[in-house]
Amino acid sequence: MERTQVVVPAGEIQRQRGIITQIAGELSRLDHPPLAMVDTYGCQQNVADSQRLMGMLRDMGCDFTQDPFQADIIVINTCAIRDNAEKKVFGVVGQLVHAKEHNPRQVICLCGCMAQQEIVAKKIRESYRHVDLVFGPQALWKFPELLHEVLENRKRVFSIENVHGSIAEGLPVVRESNVKAWVSIMYGCNNFCSYCIVPYVRGRERSREPGEILAEVRQLVEDGFKEITLLGQNVNSYGKDLLSPMDFADLLAEIDKIPGEYLIRFMTSHPKDAGEKLFDTMARCGHVAKQLHLPVQSGNSRVLRAMNRGYTREQYLEKVRYARRVMPELVLTSDIIIGFPGETEAEAMDTISLIEEVRYDALFTFLYSPRPGTPAAKLPDPASREEKQAWFDRLLEAQNRISGQLHQAYVGRTVRVLVDGESGDPRWPLSSRTHGGRLVHLSGSADLIGKYVDAHVTDSNTWALFGEVRA
Ligand code: SAH
Ligand code: SF4
Ligand code: F3S
C-alpha cells in the first residue's frame, strides 16, 4: 500500500471541518442548546477515538450528557473483542428505542469495531431500525460528512467498506482530563493471532509520522499534561511502514528529549517484537515509565503456536529476565486467555506455572471467546465451559495471591506518585499512580490533582495500595 494512499489529504480534513461548521449552524436553530452523548466500550484505542468524536461534536456546538433521553445525538463506540462485549452493546442499543420514541429527531450512531463487521451491520439494518448511522473505525474522520447526510436526508447511512485504513491528522479532540492524555502512534494490526478479531476490523498496520507524534506530545507537555500514553495494538511494530523507517525504541528516545516533568507510558507491546533495544532504551530514558504490559496469552508453547503468537514460553521468559536485569524496578503486567480451543488441563496449568515464575504485578484474564471469521473459531474445542471456568478460577486465585504479596511489600515505603483524580472514597479521597502504574488511594486535598507527590504507603490489598501524602 502506498503511503500517499494512507494519509488522508489535509484538504479532505479541511472539508470535514467545513461540514462541522455547517452542522453547527443547523443545530443552533434547535430550540435548545444541542446535547450529545458518547458511550465508549473496549480498549484505550476506542477511548482515544471517542475523544476525537467528542472534539468534532463539540465543534458542532454540542455539550455532553450521559442521559440518552436528553441527547440530540447519541454515539455508541463499540468493541468486538469478545462475545460478551458485543452482547452488552446490543442490550444498550436495544434500550435506545425508548429514547428515540421520546425524541424522534434524535440521531443514533453506532461506530467502532463491531460496526466494521458485516454480520453486525446486517443485524442493525434489519432489527435495530432506530439506529441512523453505522460506521467502522476506518471511517471515523468522515463522521461530519456521514452525520450531515443523515441530518439532511433523514435516511439511514451505513459506511463500513472494508478498507485497509488510513491516518487522519488534525482532527479536533476533547481530552478527558488535563493530567493524562492518550496519543495514538499507529493504527491497525498485522499479527493475525488466530483467536483475534482486531486485524479484521482495524485494518493493516500504519504508523503516524514521527514529526506529528513529537509535535502532539510537545504540545501536551506544554499544556501541563503529566502522563502521556502512546497507543497502538502492537507499538513494537511502529515505523515499519514509514518512508524513512524509524523503530519504536528510536521514537521513545526522541520523545524523551522533550523537556518537562512528565511520564511516557505505552501499550501494547507484542513480545515477539519487544527486544533488548527497547528494554535498554526504556532503562535509559528518564521520562519513560518502568512499566511494561507484555501480554503472554499462554504459558504453553504448543498453545502459543496454535495462537500464532510467534514466540515460545522460553523465549518469553528470556525477554522478561533481560527486561528485569536492565530495569530492576520494572512493573510487569500481562493478558491471559484460558480455554483456547484444544487447550488441555495440563496446558492451562503451564500458564499458571508461568505466572508463578514471572510474578506479574497484575493480570487481565479472559476466557476464550470464539470470534466468527477467525481461524481459531473453526478448531475443535472439546473442553467444557465448566472445566475452563475451573482452570480460570485457579489462575485468578494464584494471581490474587501474587498481587497481594507484591502490594504488601510496598507497605511502609514512600513512593513518588502522580495524583490523577478523586476516588469517591471519603477515607482516601484521591487516586494516584506510581511511576510503575500501580494504583494508590491517598488521603489529601483535591488541589493536589495533577501534581507529583511522595506517598507513604500504609496499607494494601490485591488491587491497590493506600497511603498518605508526605510533606
Ligand atoms: N494488541 C494487544 C491486545 C488487544 S486485545 C496485544 O496483542 O497484546 C486485548 C486482549 O484481549 C488480548 O491480549 C487477549 O488476551 C484478549 N483477547 C483477544 N481476543 C480474544 C478472544 N477471542 N477471546 C478471549 N480473549 C481475547
Ligand atoms: Fe489481536 Fe494479536 Fe493483533 Fe493483539 S497482536 S490485536 S491479540 S491480532
Ligand atoms: Fe475492542 Fe476494537 Fe479495542 S475490538 S479491544 S475496541 S481494537
Image (tube, rainbow, N blue to C red):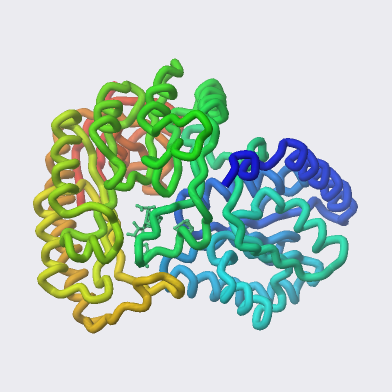
Residue 209 point in image, percent of width and height: 54, 32
Q: Is residue 469 visible?
A: no
Residue 197 point in image, percent of width and height: 44, 64
Q: Is residue 321 above or below residue 101?
A: above
Q: Is residue 367 above or below residue 74?
A: below
Query: Which residue is pictured at 67% across the width and 65% down the height?
Result: 134
Left or right of 74, for residue 428: left
Q: Quadrant of the C terminus?
A: top left
Q: Which residue is nearer to you in this view: 330 or 203?
A: 203
Instruction: Say which quarter of the image contains residue 341.
Output: bottom left
Query: Which residue is pictured at 49% across the width and 42% down the height?
Result: 186
Left or right of 150, for residue 71: left
Left or right of 424, for residue 336: left
Query: Which residue is pictured at 21% across the width and 35% down the height?
Result: 330
Residue 34 point in image, percent of width and height: 78, 53
Query: Which residue is pictured at 12% across the width and 40% down the height?
Result: 409
Residue 194 point in image, percent of width and height: 35, 65
Q: Is residue 422 above or below residue 471?
A: below
